[in-house]
Image: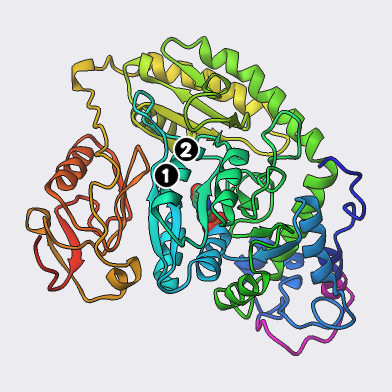
Amino acid sequence: MSAFPAGQPTAPYLDAVISYGFRGPARFHVPGHKVSGADPGLIHAFGADALALDIPQDIEGIDIGPRPTPYERAEALAAAAYGADRCWFLTNGASQGNHALALALAPLGARAVVQRNSHASLVDGLVLSGGLPVFVAPEYDAELGMAHGITPTALAAALDAATQATAAFMVSPTYYGMAADIAGCVEVAHAHGVPLIVDAAWGAHFGFHAGLPASPLALGADAMLASTHKIVGSLTQSAMLLVSGSGRVDVGAVARAVRLVRSTSPSALLLASLDGARRQLAVHGEMLIDATIAAAARVRGLIEAIPGCRVVGAEQVGRPGVAGWDPLRLVIDVRGTGHTGYEIAEALRSGYDIHLELSTHQAMVLVLGLAQPLEPLMRFAHDLAEAVRLLAPADPAARVSVPPPPSGAAPAVVAPREAFLGASEAVPVDAAVGRISTESIAGYPPGIPTLLPGERITAEVVGYLRALTAAGARLHGAADPSFATVRVLAGSLSA
Ligand SMILES: Cc1ncc(COP(=O)(O)O)c(C=O)c1O
């Protein structure tokens, strides 16, 4: 936040919920637990206070009554904190935001340019909306096995090909904390007459500290998603959808779509956590992020002193698809140890009860939060050194690196909606060549979907996914994780 945070030290929705929860109103509405009727174990676990704040929608003085209601003021404060015109609080994660944005911006039959390794929820959104994706491939670092962002050049090529596209959807930062050149992509998208939507699920803290990349909206994006529960402290499953004042996104269409994919009973606890997390971030975020950056910097040296370990980050900036980097992600390249990230992560889990965000063949990823305490990081560095030392020597010849097939290896034949909703059958993978997939399958690494609903399965794709499975990678989204069978459109003809 650059401007003086007017109003940001208040949390109107949180305060209104607290007032109602504890002033002793007679509550003859849902929920049915009435606090005292809840299971004693539940009361012990959550505390009676949390149950007292578990209130429904449509309570006078909270989300109905004189306007702006505390709920409306809370969303407006969040919009102001992010430099947005409108904010919607979400109680089904950034996933819900992707569903709503696809419904609003890529309606039935419309073409939208979509980063190939977008989160599965965006493809799910296209299943709901009937929009048609035109994919743009992310940059890929084969050595590190990491997909980065898209480049303005790649976006321009995709938009040139996708005539009459209605929007462009990209992701920044990535799971590895690498931020894309959003300003460059904004310029390209706007020159093509489409809004640029940035899935910043992992970047809700961007723009709140000088050592972090700027927020996508500050760089000109027309809408963004912030999965605020990931890093900035709201409760799991809460998130925000933010639309800028550029006028390129139809706010009415977004409002309708959000309504379509939201419960009529959103959790007051989740919503209140969004209001509180926004206040904390806007008012104290800079200092809290400072503490985390300092802790991460201290532990970095300890990790790099471990033979074979290297922290990946700032040195990536400037490589294709990487315009910035998030110091709140500790990405450790473990190739030099002779072990995979999977092996080391498993040793840390079973030997030290340490649980990481992600591990791949080449790397391990730790997610830090606001005011990350130093002590657990110091302990981690110590335990990592010990785990690497104690692991049995590995046979480097056993290392398998599986290069991904070229982008577009599985040609799109029918719309994701048609494939997903059509009658499907599971067939042995060898018999699936030439059939149309109804599944999304992405191997980690590289986390780029190899198959999406509506794409024709080729021998190359089957060979690649088999090799990935054999190398120990996980297949995200596969109905059969062993990849013995795959679901295809029933009756779809072979090529
Ligand atoms: C890029 C991206 N977008 C959206 C999501 C979905 O977020 P949520 O878990 O808040 O629904 C994720 C989840 O990891 C993600 O990585």
Tell whether position 219 is magenta.
no
Q: Is mark 1 within 8 Å of ligand 1?
A: no
Considering the numbered disc 2 on the image, is that residue within a helix, a strand or a loop? helix
Mark 1, Cα crowd under 10 Å, few <14 / some 14-19 / many 20+, is few
Question: Percent position (x, y) of residue 491?
Answer: 12, 73
Q: Secondary structure at mark 1?
A: helix
For disc 2, the marked residue is 153
467 relative to 95, above or below: above
Mark 1: which amino acid?
Ala
Task: Give residue 69's quadrant in the image.
Answer: bottom right
Q: Is residue 366 visible?
A: yes
- The boundaries of the magenta stretch are 19-32
Q: Nearer the viewer, residue 278 or 378?
A: 278
Dominant secondary structure (helix, strand or loop) of the stretch shown in magenta: loop
Q: Are marks 1 and 2 in contact (CB under 8 Å)?
A: yes
Please state which of residues 59 and 243 is positioned toward the viewer in this rendering. Answer: 243
| Residue type at the position of mark 2 | Thr
Q: Residue at x 29, y 62 (%)?
A: 453
- In the rendered structure, the answer to whether residue 136 lies left or right of residue 285 reads left
**Image point 69% across, 48% down: which residue?**
217
